Every structure is written in structure tokens, then in C-alpha cells.
Amino acid sequence: MEVYDLVTLGGGSDFAEVIRACKSVGRYCLIGGLAVNCYVEPVYTVDADIVVDPSRTAALPLKFEDPEARASELRIQFTTDPRYRDFPSRAQRRTVLGTEVFVACLEDVTQGKLWAYGDPARRLSERKKDELDLIRLAESFPELKRTYPPELVSMLDGI
């Protein structure tokens, strides 16, 4: 975590503070790249994507969504997309950046990455990061390929 704090200028501390706030408002879970890192060899990311109950987001301190209000380079994204609403009920406790946190289960992390990968409105560079996360997941959990679109499955033949 020391390296992460150095690179993000204190992002690990901000992450712990965000998780404390999420715990105080009810069910939540981590999704996105940090969640992927819980299941496969980690790669560096400054994004913390979190699902929270949309009716409870107003209870979260505004500074978490305002990068100007934080000292660190950690980018926090609260997802209120209704497709994710059941993820917290299946989440598992993990330790992320030294903080105990609820992380979406493997299947839900994969589904979230598939939604992101398939979103034509996302920047190509973001979709490529999602593609890489899906490849990393399939390398460690080949059974996930059955949920992937054909173009990804064809790239993964032989894994």
C-alpha cells in the first residue's frame, strides 16, 4: 500500500475513508479494476468504482465526488446504474489497499466488465482496459469465457 499511496499521493487513505463512508450508508460493493485485482494478478489503477444504493448517495460526503476536494489522485466513481443494484447482496469481504471492503463476486465483476466493454459510448481506451481485464479474468477462470461475446472468445481460444 505504501507504493500506491506514493503514486496516488495518499489514495490509500482516501480509499479507506470512502469505504468507511459507504459502510455508514448501507450496502455497497467495489466493482471495476480494483475488484478485478482481487481475483487475478493486480495491475495499477487509480480508479475506485463503487456500487451504492442510489437512495443513499446523498448521505455520502460530497468531497468524494469532487477531485478538487481531495489531496490524492484517487478517482472515485459511485455507480448507481440499476443493473448493479443486486451486486452488494452477493459481495464478499476482501482486503483492498489495507482496508476491509465488500467486493462484488467474481461473476458480478465479470458482468460489470462485460457491460463496460460492450458500451459503444465508452472511449476506445477505456473499452480496451475492460477487454484486458476480461482477458485476465478468463486466463485465471476459463469457465467465464462462456459468458463472453464471440469476438473475445475467439481471441481466447487456447486458454
Image: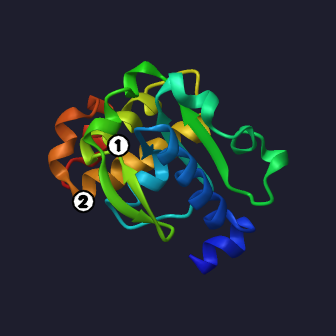
* Mark 1 Cα-neighbour bin, 10 Å: few <14, some 14–19, many ≥20: many
Q: Is residue 80 left or right of residue 7?
A: left
Indicate how the structure is coloured in the image.
rainbow
Toward the viewer: 159 or 143? 143
Write the residue at 26% across / 34% down: 148
Residue 90, above or below 135: above
* Mark 2 Cα-neighbour bin, 10 Å: few <14, some 14–19, many ≥20: few
Write the residue at 55% across / 64% down: 44
Q: Is residue 102 left or right of residue 105?
A: right
Residue 138 pos. (x, y %)? 26, 51
**Disc 2 to disc 1, C-alpha distance:** 14 Å
Residue 109 has which mark?
Answer: 1
Residue 21 pos. (x, y %)? 57, 47
Q: Amino acid at mark 1?
A: Val
Which badge, 2 or 1, is on the more N-terminal residue? 1
- Secondary structure type for disc 2: helix
Is residue 19 among what the camera can see?
yes
Toward the viewer: 28 or 7? 28
- Secondary structure type for disc 1: helix
Residue 140 has which mark?
Answer: 2
Residue 27, above or below 6: above
> What is the quadrant of residue 20 in the picture?
bottom right
Residue 89 pos. (x, y %)? 28, 36
Q: Is residue 51 left or right of residue 39?
A: right
Q: Is residue 113 left or right of residue 147?
A: right
Toward the viewer: 90 or 39? 90
Viewport quadrant of the N terminus:
bottom right
